[in-house]
């Protein structure tokens, strides 16, 4: 992995140039939508680009799945599920599409459906780390920390990204295995010395260890780095159980102020159903 400020400008420039040369390239609009969503935090522009990509190619499963994820982020769950299911209809065997749709189900509170998709992914490709990562998330939410640890360990063994290792650290912390969580934290810190590891990974483990000051410190670094996972922070805080130390983050004025700086959109449902 490379820092976003090294890769995103080139990615954005290439996509913008492509749309200048040919405004009918659905893939270029999808790329701009993803940049606006995950990096620039330009929410209206992101939606415009996603919708334009789908308008130009209604059978683009990738565009449908990322737009569904974006709508889930906005808490427009009904719309999100509509586009997610359309994506699966177009390309039911794609691991990427299944994973994106699985996370959309998960964010909509459909943990059982997300778990079923994760199981389907293991049937398509038993060695796909994303299936076990998604399973782990569903088990964490249900409070089944032991199974979460098992499946997240499997995900890491299959080459999962640092964020998966961070979730394994969080699972151990929630299970009361503080020493193991701290060992994973040290591993992530060592990895960050050698290559790029998103700061959100460190914040994720520190938050579950209840270390608020270090959590806020790493969230600020994640903000500076424009970590894509940061866009889901508010939803993660709001959905955390009362006993989860992540829940307390939502009451910290520094975290509230950080979220305000991101200028997160209103979570009110929109009646706009264009591109359906």
Image (cartoon, rainbow, N blue to C red):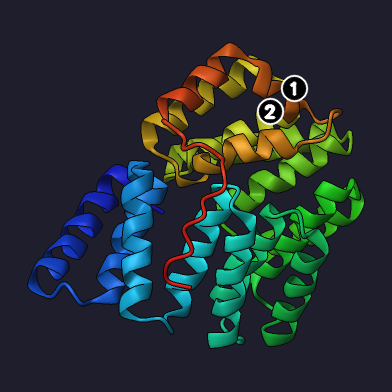
Residue 59 x, y percent position in the rendering: 43, 84
Tell me, yes or no, whether the two marked residues, 1 and 2, touch with CB atoms within 8 Å: yes
Taking depth in this image into account, of 201 and 28 the one nearest to the observer is 28
- The local secondary structure at tag 1 comes to loop
Residue 159 at least partly seen: no
Residue labelled with disc 1: 210
* Residue 108: mark in rendering: none
* Residue 254 falls left or right of residue 175: left
Which residue is pictured at 79% across the width and 73% down the height?
Answer: 116
Residue labelled with disc 2: 207
Snapshot quadrant of residue 22: bottom left
View extreme (left): residue? 21
Taking depth in this image into account, of 195 and 102 the one nearest to the observer is 102
Which quarter of the image is occupied by the N terminus?
A: bottom left
Q: In the image, is residue 183 above or below residue 27?
A: above
Residue 80 x, y percent position in the rendering: 58, 62
Within-10-Å neighbours for mark 1: few <14, some 14–19, many 20+: some
Residue 99 x, y percent position in the rendering: 61, 69
Snapshot quadrant of residue 186: top right
Q: In the image, is residue 232 above or below residue 252?
A: below
* Residue 18 falls left or right of residue 88: left
Taking depth in this image into account, of 100 and 124 the one nearest to the observer is 100
Snapshot quadrant of residue 131: bottom right
Which residue is pictured at 20% across the width and 77% down the height?
Answer: 24
**Structural distance between the alpha carbons of marks 1 and 2:** 5 Å
């Amino acid at each position: 992995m490379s820092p976003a400020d090294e890769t995103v400008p080139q990615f954005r420039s290439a996509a913008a140039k492509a749309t200048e040369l040919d405004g009918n390239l659905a893939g270029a609009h999808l790329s701009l939508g993803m940049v606006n969503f995950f990096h620039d935090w330009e929410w209206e522009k992101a939606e415009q680009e996603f919708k334009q990509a789908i308008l130009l190619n209604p059978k683009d499963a990738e565009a449908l799945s990322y737009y569904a994820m974006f709508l889930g982020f906005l808490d427009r769950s009904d719309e999100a599920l509509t586009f997610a299911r359309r994506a699966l209809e177009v390309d039911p065997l794609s691991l990427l599409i299944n994973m994106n749709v699985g996370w959309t189900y998960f964010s909509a509170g459909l943990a059982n459906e997300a778990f079923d998709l994760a199981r389907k992914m293991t049937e398509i490709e038993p060695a796909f780390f994303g299936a076990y990562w998604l399973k782990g998330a569903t088990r964490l939410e249900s409070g089944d920390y032991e199974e979460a640890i098992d499946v997240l360990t499997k995900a890491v063994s299959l080459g999962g990204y640092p964020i998966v290792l961070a979730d394994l650290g969080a699972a151990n912390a929630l299970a009361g295995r503080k020493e193991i969580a701290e060992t994973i934290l040290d591993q992530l810190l060592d990895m960050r010395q050698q290559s790029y590891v998103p700061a959100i990974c460190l914040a994720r483990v520190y938050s579950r260890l209840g270390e608020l000051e270090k959590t806020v410190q790493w969230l600020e670094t994640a903000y500076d780095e424009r970590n894509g996972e940061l866009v889901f922070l508010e939803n993660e805080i709001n959905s955390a159980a009362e006993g989860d130390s992540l829940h307390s983050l939502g009451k910290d004025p520094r975290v509230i102020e950080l979220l305000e700086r991101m200028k997160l959109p209103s979570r009110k449902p929109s009646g706009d159903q264009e591109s359906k």
